[in-house]
Amino acid sequence: MKIAVLIEDSYNLLEAWYPYIRLKEEGIEALFMGTGKESYASKEGFPAKADVSVKEADLSSFDGIIIPGGYAPDRLRRFIEINDFVRDSHEKGKMIAAICHAGWVLVSAGILKGEKATCFFAIKDDMINAGAEYVDEEVVVHGNLITSRTPDDLPAFCREIIGFLRKKQD
């Protein structure tokens, strides 16, 4: 299995690295996918080197996407390639996992209509206006969409991601 962890400047350190490392611990290939630069800085300045660019990758070879929060989602959503990748993957039933402000990417990709989801409370109205049924829970799984609210929810978020991917492997 191969999972893209989307990365852009001002990403949330924990929300990017925790799932990335957990997937690797489980023997699942995780790649940081950027928008075109070589390296991206977290909100705290911690670097993440892109393994691949969304503009150059064979997007069909990925089994899922993890979108960390922070302020990176506001940058990610500005790239048509990111929105297309998320939309196409969602339509193919591939895993889409978004935490915190990452819901903004789901909004811009146009995949929330009729979906049950959660997010950081500050973007709840955006999610609802995009057609989501908002639920305030640590993790919400609805079909192939997995969403969480904050770094505190990372253990439940990663547990559901790994569980989803294991079921796909069986």
Image (tube, rainbow, N blue to C red):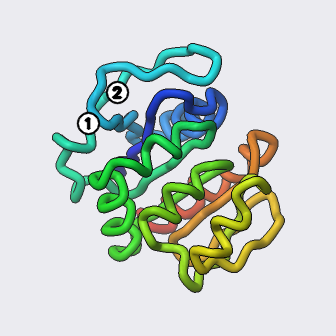
Q: Nearer the viewer, residue 7 or 165?
A: 7
Q: Which mark, by number, is residue 50?
A: 2
Q: Which mark, by number, is residue 142?
A: none
Q: As shown in the figure, which amino acid type bears the numbered disc 1?
A: Ser
For numbered disc 2, what is the local secondary structure? loop
Question: Which image quadrant for residue 33?
Answer: top left
Q: Nearer the viewer, residue 141 or 79?
A: 79
70 lies left or right of 2 = right
Question: Which image quadrant for residue 60?
Answer: bottom left
143 in relation to 83, above or below:
below
3 in relation to 46, above or below:
below
For numbered disc 1, what is the local secondary structure? strand
How many residues crowd mark 1 within 10 Å: few (<14), some (14–19), many (20+)?
many
C-alpha separation, residue under disc 1 versus residue under disc 2: 7 Å
- Report whether residue 170 is seen: no
Give the residue at x 30% y 55%: 80
In percent of width and height, residue 170 lies at 44, 67
Q: As shown in the figure, which amino acid type bears the numbered disc 2?
A: Ala
Give the residue at x 52% y 37%: 72
Labelled pair 1, 2 in contact (Cβ < 8 Å): yes
Give the residue at x 43% y 53%: 65
Give the residue at x 54% y 74%: 112
In percent of width and height, residue 26 lies at 52, 41
Q: Name the residue under label 1.
A: 53
